[in-house]
Image: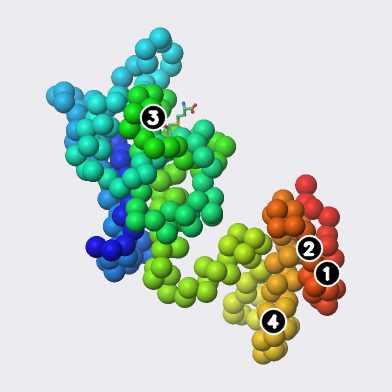
Amino acid sequence: MTGVRIDVFSIFPEMLTGFFGQSLLGRAQRGDLVDLRAHDLREHTSDVHRSVDDSPFGGGAGMVLSPEPIFRSVESAQPPRPLYLLGPGGRRFDQSVAEELAASPGFSMICGRYEGVDQRVRDHLCDGELSIGAFVLNGGEAAALAIVEAVVRLVPGVMGNIESAADESFTSGLLEYPQYTRPAVFRDWAVPDVLRSGDHGRIARWRRAQAIARTLRDRPDLIAHRGGVSDAERALLDEFGLVAAEPHD
Ligand code: SAH
């Protein structure tokens, strides 16, 4: 096995395995490009009820995942490091983190549930914390799935057409240009003529102009981050009658 190995620890491993087996992820695993492993924290409980949680010291609502099953599960699986705890307060996962992880030999994630996990897991077992956004989920599984999918599609060899990843939103610092497929006219809405012109140079310029205009409108922060719009890019916007529009609210 030479690909990227990703281990995920959860009390609902079936939520993960179904997803891992389908579509691009399933193909990538069958092709030995990635090795995705879901571990059931309940397999490492020591009581008859197989309990994985308990009420919080100091009182308060809800339950907290106990340290024992998590430590034992990780110790027995010997997962690839870094091992990340998933949580809303972690380092924000984005395309650059996905690229970093896709280029690594592997990494692992622990899915919390209920009110979260015992602090000692964070302090003495994990190497860091990852968040998929400033909102609260019921558990880390949906976050783990989003991260696995974003990472695996960047692993070399996974996507058939490697150019489709290079062209995408964020990778170039811009959002993607608009895409169309057949029919050429759908409910009176026609595909832009340039795309059917066969003039590949003009098509490439139009796409670049559209990507710049769209990013200026929807994500001006990305434009600021890359140092604004160059004179050549302004000329490109002019060529297609696109203005450096005011940002959307
Ligand atoms: N009480 C916690 C939230 C617990 S949510 C708090 O206030 O911070 C239950 C679990 O869902 C968490 O342990 C975490 O693993 C997962 N989770 C929730 N929101 C997440 C997010 N934005 N990113 C990644 N994981 C998240």
Element under disc 4: helix
The dot on residue 231 is: 1
Give me the residue at 24% from left, 26% from top.
68
Please state if 212 lies on the left or on the right of 119 as rendered.
right
Mark 2 lies on residue:
229
Residue tagged by mark 3? 122
Gap in angstroms between the C-alphas marked 4 and 1: 20 Å
How far from the left and from the top, in percent, is residue 36?
Answer: 30, 54
Instruction: Name the disc covering residue 203, or none.
Output: 4
- How far apart in space, not on screen, are marks 3 and 2 (Cα)? 43 Å
Query: Label 1's element?
Result: helix
Give the CA separation, mark 1 to mark 3.
49 Å
Q: Residue at x 34, y 56 (%)?
A: 105
- Tag 4 or tag 2, which sits nearer the N-term? 4
Residue 73: quarter of image? top left
- Residue lying at 70% horizontally and 67% vertically, measured from the top left: 211
